[in-house]
Image (cartoon, helix red, strand yellow):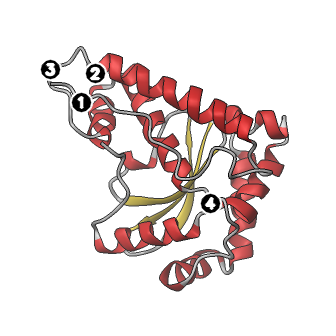
Amino acid sequence: MTVQFKLPELPYDVGALEPHISRTTMETHHGKHHAAYIKNMNAIMAERADAPNTLEEVVLLAQKEGNKKLFNNAAQSWNHAFFWESLSPSVQDGPSGDLKAAIEKAFSSLDAFKDEAKTKGVGHFASGWLWLVADKSGAVKLIDTHDADTAITDSSVTPLLVCDVWEHAYYLDYKNERPKFLDAFVSKLVNWRFAEAQYQAARTGSGAWRFPV
């Protein structure tokens, strides 16, 4: 029987990210955009007898087959779920321990990381995603992907955080001012505790976040 993936519940109340991300944005972004990707993916996979049991496997299968429609909906389903985990309703000072050391090594300081993240996110043309990733050695870097492309198709890295830079992520709250949204993300919204757990998973090769089944 084909697995039917469900829209994950938010890890906080729908209005918990205000004033940086409004309840209205979250209701639309999570309850409509994300839900539509899940629905579309399930409809496509329902026609297949070889449907994988995990979303990660669905994404990789779609990439291998060059099935753009399936890839777009599956990857966007995964990316959005990871984005919700990357956000915290309470402001966190920054990373600690090994992740703090890795960021300072790569960017010289947390402030320099924030500046580079904002610059890269603002400079990303059109729709996509801004990721902080770690390789197996523990080195961290910022990458951006276009449209539905996702960091999980690169087996050499583990995603630690992601910021959605599609306009639907911020337009109701910030209109065309993507820089203000990115500033709010890096300064007020990052879930550093989640990133630390992902970083340890990158170092050990196990325990990374997976889409709930």
> Disc 3 marks which amino acid?
Ala
> In this orientation, does residue 81 appear?
yes
Question: Which circle marks residue 3 in the picture?
Answer: 1
Q: Nearer the viewer, mark 2 or mark 1?
A: 1
Residue at which label 3 appears:
49
Query: How far across and how far down the image is residue 176, in percent?
Result: 84, 35
The kind of secondary structure element at disc 1 is loop
> Disc 2 marks which amino acid?
Met
Tell me the distance, in whole angstroms, between the alpha carbons under discs 1 and 4.
30 Å
Tell me the distance, in whole angstroms, between the alpha carbons under discs 3 and 2.
8 Å
Tell me the distance, in whole angstroms, between the alpha carbons under discs 3 and 1.
10 Å
Residue at which label 4 appears:
88
Q: Going from the N terminus, do you reach mark 4 or mark 3 first?
A: 3
Q: Going from the N terminus, do you reach mark 2 or mark 1 first?
A: 1
> Disc 1 marks which amino acid?
Val
Q: Are discs 1 and 4 less than 8 Å apart at CB? A: no
